[in-house]
Amino acid sequence: MKVRVIAAVALLPLLLLVVLVAPKICTAILFGAMAAIAAFELLSGTGIVKHPRICTYCAVMAFWCVLWCGLGIGYAWLVLSVLVFWCVLFAEVMASGMKLAFEKLAACLVAGIVTPMLLGALVRIHAGEHGVFFILIPFVLAFLSDTGAYFVGLAFGKHKLAPVISPKKTVEGMVGGVLGAMVGMLIFCAVLQLFGFTVNYLYALVYGLFGSLAGVFGDLCFSVVKRQTGIKDYGNLIPGHGGILDRFDSMMLVAPLAEALLLLLPVAVK
């Protein structure tokens, strides 16, 4: 627990420094690198794809997908890159004498395209209007939900939420996570008012509710993969936390949900 807290205290300010201060392209590069590592963890770390060259292709594609989100270049470039990626994967299947199973290719598409496009929501939010403020919303939702769920679950947790997938999660913890995310969003909106934004506190509660639930489900989604492949963590890159996917699994759903909510129910306008 001590190592986990120290790592979070050390790394979170660095992450926020890049997101809030550095040029926007730096944010795209940072999250692109994280997506590349996550792709490698999802394939090689789990043993789903034991083919270093293909795992590398997927990591490169994951990096490019997130970087594309921040470059603001034409959609055609993404389509072309997906086309090339598809052809390269099937070329490897043909070169292997049909030994590479289709389900492994499907895992490659998830690791190389789907998960980075989900995580890329952070970059798309950051690149939008007032993105330097709104990029914090997914972090408020994910981290305060995790914090609320941890402490409430530790104190009051009795009823298991998904005992086969994630034995430590409880219904009480989930409720604590929802409350944590809601309170966090209310505080965040109060801060936004200080910067001249007009905020909608009802929408803030909606963000907190659905953002927290999305985080729980995202965590469970990647826990399913760990249980089916028999691993404890996706990696050991972050002391006390595991790999990128262990720390940012919930963000895979929270970030795109926040992106959609910002478009459909703007919580703050200026």
Image (cartoon, rainbow, N blue to C red):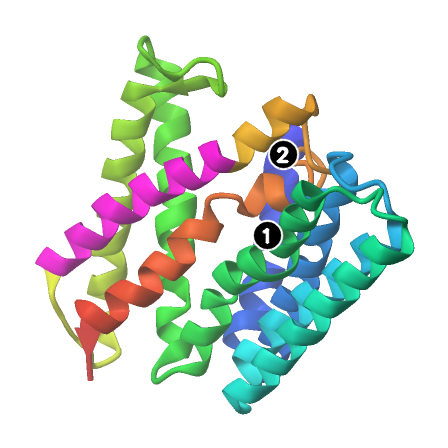
Q: Residue at x 44, y 13 (%)?
A: 163
Side of 219 relative to 11 (left or right): left
Asked if the magenta segment contains residue 220, the reply would be: yes
The picture places residue 50, in percent across and down from the top left corner, at: 84, 40
- Judge whether residue 240 can be spotted in this image: yes
**Is residue 201 or residue 54 the one in the foreground?**
54
- Front residue of 68/151: it is 68
Residue 7 x, y percent position in the rendering: 66, 42
Q: Which residues are magenta?
A: 202-221
In the displayed structure, would residue 34 be above or below residue 145? below
Q: Residue at x 39, y 52 (%)?
A: 254
Give the alpha-carbon distance from disc 2 to disc 1, as whole Å. Answer: 29 Å
Q: Secondary structure at mark 2?
A: helix
Residue 206 part of the magenta-drawn span: yes
The disc placed on residue 4 is 2
Q: Which residue is mark 1?
A: 110
Q: Earlier in the sequence, mark 2 or mark 1?
A: 2
